[in-house]
Image (tube, rainbow, N blue to C red):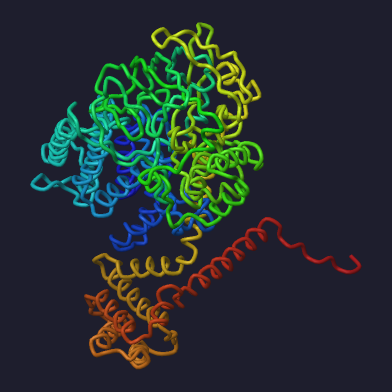
């Protein structure tokens, strides 16, 4: 194994060992196997490029290109040309995945689920660091600075982990870096043969850098010193990292403003990215349990946050001011005293494994009693953690209103206030026209906004032929909405986004709420809410009633009473004394999550329309065989057109790199230089003429190639050197022949047209020598086999007549 190959293997191993520090950040480890396979392919491409050899910057560029192809194959093959060639759609898809991954990082506690966005960030980060380490340590032969990207990789993991990255991962990362330093030291010593300032080695012995004498230990001591400094920095840097906000990043800072005083803002977030992953969890883990005195638990949606800004790419929360939670929350905007309302009380408890910055509550809350650092956002009526406060293990009590409008009150609602209409009916210019056209076609004949909203809900839930499917690729932009209306298959995100967008095109104020459906009743009278109860639904504004829930998603949740034009039920009771929920009471449209016990839902019972997690889901990535096969296919597609160029580059480097000090070596070097001269001229359209002497052949190349004086003199010097080694009794061996050949090549390129230069580089005519060599080898192989066959089965003499 050559020194560079050994160094490349050590660079890849060091990168993987440092990447191990990121394993505790997510709940699955399959991404590291995927990263290892792609890293091996990336390192292999670097080895081939260096063997050609290509220029150092070109080697790094080829590795970067192959890395992009590999990432396209794994993460964007559906958007790519032939599954591997990146297109503009691939880069847009990468941008969406990275944005989603950033949202996931800010939302989940450690260990986070391995979503597509997080997986791209992890695998892509490892490949980027691996490329940097390989370029520094192997291509540019400076292993010491290669410790910086390794240090950055470990420091990021240490900064994100709640209890640091752990001593095991620290030692593995340090061992990888020291291994890289020792490999470089061994490679350098093997080239020099002895250590600077040390005694010479005995004849025939090549130093490996690990000899027992004092001189040989110098590089080892240097490596140890560098390693000690790097390890010390690795210990100090995580302590100096700035605190990051919320979720996966840190439990000490949240999205709220500093302090508990007034003011501060709440950042724009998008909790919907994780909905599909929550719905597809193989195990429905409980996140919240609660007890309520509401008589009808079917309406007990736990609302987390509302998304009220649609920018053409996604729905998200507008950046708004937050304040201290008042002792009594103000009445909901637009709610008239004439609308019937009942106050209920709910006591909730969040699981220890559920860390969310936003507080799930029944809507609209009128009073919140909770300990900790929590703030209030008035427009969305949401409660959010401040300075890292999350829902992990918290217990709280919420008084909320059960608002029971009648169909007549909603139908008679006056126009909304100008400020509400202006903010909550905005749609982007990029929204496809089919969205508004479909909305107007469905609601044709409706007399008011309430009838239009009910028609939209019924079209999605029953009349439009839509199918609930959580395996559909999530999307929230304008094209995703149009695609959903055409394919008619999706889950709650698609239904809520589409209905809210269509309502806005009809000038009905709309937004999207995110939270949980009521959950399932337990034997002790409590309600249990799991990950699969995660849900999104549209809220439409009606003056006199306020923000009103609708349910367009089929088989999920329940359609509100006021959309079925039935008399509302009586939920009144004593708010001070919560009682067990009577969830056995059936509604016309029962929720699967409410009526089906959790253990049966996990087993796929109760006729649940929610599909279980498929064994080959996107989160697990494509199979290893597909990655390797596709990667090799992509490399082949890329390499086949470049084979003549790579072969010609390799041959030129070998011919001009012939060394040695003996006379025979000098003769071989001169003849190789002359062969390179004739092939270079051939590539530029001057075929070789074997009938001419070197002197006349050189004059012909100068004439046909229209060479300037400098290049012409170089050709003649090479020809004179060839005549010396061929004809002189005691030839004088010339020096500088490789430089003469390079000047000839530059002169021919300068006088050639652009198309001729491209032809000479990409399809060199001298590549015909490959076919000649193959033909000669085939002829020789046939001759050898014929001789062997003749020896094994000699021909029998012909029988004589009459014998």
User: Is 579 on the left-hand or right-hand side of 25?
Assistant: right
| Vertical order, 235 against 417 (above or below) | above
Q: Nearer the viewer, residue 625 or 675?
A: 625
Q: Residue furthest left?
A: 197
Question: Percent x, y for residue 645?
Answer: 42, 69
Q: Position of residue 141 (x, y in %)?
A: 23, 52
Label tally: 0
Tell me the quarter of the image containing the C terminus: bottom right
Q: Position of residue 556 (x, y in %)?
A: 57, 29
Residue at 64% from the left image edge and 21% from the top image edge: 606
| Residue at x 30% of width, y 49% of height | 134
Q: Is residue 178 left or right of residue 541?
A: left
Q: Nearer the viewer, residue 371 or 133?
A: 371
Picture layout, residue 438 above or below residue 19 = below
At horizontal 67% and vertical 55% (from top left) the residue drawn is 792
Residue 385 falls in which quadrant of the image?
Answer: top left
Asked whether the viewer can see residue 33, the reply is no
- Left or right, 456 with respect to 714, comes to right
Residue 691 drawn at (x, y percent): 44, 89
| Residue lying at the far right of the rendered structure | 802
């Amino acid at each position: 194994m050559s020194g560079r190959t050994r160094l490349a293997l050590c660079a890849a191993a060091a990168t993987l060992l440092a990447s191990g520090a990121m394993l505790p950040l997510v709940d699955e480890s399959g991404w590291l196997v995927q990263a290892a396979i792609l890293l091996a392919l990336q390192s292999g491409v670097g080895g081939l490029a260096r063997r050609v050899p290509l220029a150092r910057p070109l080697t790094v560029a080829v590795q970067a290109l192959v890395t992009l192809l590999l990432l396209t194959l794994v993460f964007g093959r559906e958007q790519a040309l032939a599954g591997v060639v990146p297109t503009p759609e691939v880069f847009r898809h990468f941008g969406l995945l990275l944005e989603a991954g950033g949202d996931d990082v800010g939302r989940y506690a450690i260990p986070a689920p391995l979503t597509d966005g997080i997986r791209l960030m992890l695998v892509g980060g490892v490949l980027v660091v691996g490329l940097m380490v390989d370029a520094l340590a192997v291509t540019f032969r400076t292993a010491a600075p290669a410790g910086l990207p390794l240090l950055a990789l470990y420091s990021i993991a240490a900064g994100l982990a709640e209890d640091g990255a752990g001593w095991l991962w620290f030692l593995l990362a340090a061992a990888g870096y020291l291994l890289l330093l020792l490999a470089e030291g061994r490679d350098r010593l093997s080239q020099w043969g002895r250590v600077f300032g040390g005694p010479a080695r005995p004849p025939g012995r090549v130093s490996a850098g690990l000899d027992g004498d004092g001189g040989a230990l110098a590089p080892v001591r240097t490596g140890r010193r560098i390693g000690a400094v790097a390890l010390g920095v690795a210990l100090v840097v995580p302590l100096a990292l700035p605190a990051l906000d919320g979720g996966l990043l840190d439990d000490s800072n949240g999205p709220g403003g500093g302090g508990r005083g007034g003011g501060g803002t709440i950042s724009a977030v998008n909790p919907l990215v994780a909905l599909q992953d929550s719905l597809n969890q193989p195990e429905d883990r409980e996140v919240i349990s609660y007890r309520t005195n509401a008589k009808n638990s079917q309406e007990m949606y736990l609302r987390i946050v509302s998304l009220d800004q649609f920018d053409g790419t996604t729905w998200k929360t507008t950046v708004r001011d937050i304040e201290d939670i008042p002792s009594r929350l103000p009445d909901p905007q637009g709610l008239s005293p004439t609308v019937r309302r009942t106050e209920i009380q709910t006591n909730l408890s969040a699981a220890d494994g559920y860390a969310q910055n936003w507080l799930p509550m029944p809507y609209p809350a009128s009073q919140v009693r909770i300990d900790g650092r929590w703030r209030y956002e008035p427009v969305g009526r949401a409660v959010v953690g401040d300075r890292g406060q999350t829902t992990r293990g918290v217990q709280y009590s919420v008084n909320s209103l059960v608002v029971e409008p009648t169909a007549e009150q909603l139908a008679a609602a006056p126009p909304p206030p100008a400020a509400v209409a202006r903010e909550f009916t905005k749609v982007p210019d990029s929204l496809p026209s089919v969205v508004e056209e479909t909305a107007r076609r469905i609601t044709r004949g409706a007399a008011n906004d309430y009838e239009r909203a009910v028609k939209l809900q019924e079209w999605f839930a029953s009349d439009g032929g839509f199918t609930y499917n959580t395996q559909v690729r999530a999307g929230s932009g304008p094209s995703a909405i149009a695609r959903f209306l055409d394919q008619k298959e999706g889950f709650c995100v698609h239904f809520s986004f589409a209905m809210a967008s269509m309502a806005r095109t009809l000038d009905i104020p709309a937004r999207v709420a995110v939270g949980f459906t009521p959950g399932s009743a337990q034997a002790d009278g409590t309600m249990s809410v799991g990950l699969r109860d995660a849900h999104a639904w549209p809220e439409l504004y009606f003056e006199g009633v306020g923000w009103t829930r609708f349910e367009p998603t089929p088989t999920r949740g329940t359609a509100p009473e006021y959309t079925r034009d039935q008399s509302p039920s009586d939920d009144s009771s004593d708010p001070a004394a919560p009682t067990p929920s009577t969830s056995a009471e059936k509604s016309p449209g029962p929720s699967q999550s409410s009526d089906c016990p959790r253990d049966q839902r996990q087993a796929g019972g109760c006729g649940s329309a929610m599909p279980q997690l498929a064994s080959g889901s996107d989160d697990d990535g494509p199979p290893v065989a597909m990655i390797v096969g596709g990667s090799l296919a992509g490399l082949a597609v890329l390499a086949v057109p470049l084979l003549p160029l790579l072969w010609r580059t390799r041959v030129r480097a070998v011919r001009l790199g012939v060394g040695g000090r003996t006379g025979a070596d000098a003769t071989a070097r001169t003849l190789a230089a002359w062969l390179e001269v004739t092939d270079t001229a051939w590539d530029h359209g001057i075929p070789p003429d074997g009938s001419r002497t070197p002197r006349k052949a050189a004059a012909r190349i100068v004439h046909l190639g229209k060479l300037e004086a400098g290049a012409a003199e170089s050709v003649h010097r090479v020809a004179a050197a060839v005549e010396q080694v061929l004809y002189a009794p005691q030839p004088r061996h010339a020096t500088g022949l490789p430089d003469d050949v390079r000047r000839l090549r530059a002169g021919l390129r300068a006088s050639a047209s652009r198309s001729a230069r491209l032809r000479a580089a990409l399809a060199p005519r001298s590549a015909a020598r490959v076919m000649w060599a193959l033909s000669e080898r085939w002829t020789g192989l046939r001759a050898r086999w014929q001789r062997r066959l003749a020896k094994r089965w000699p021909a029998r003499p012909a029988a004589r007549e009459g014998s």
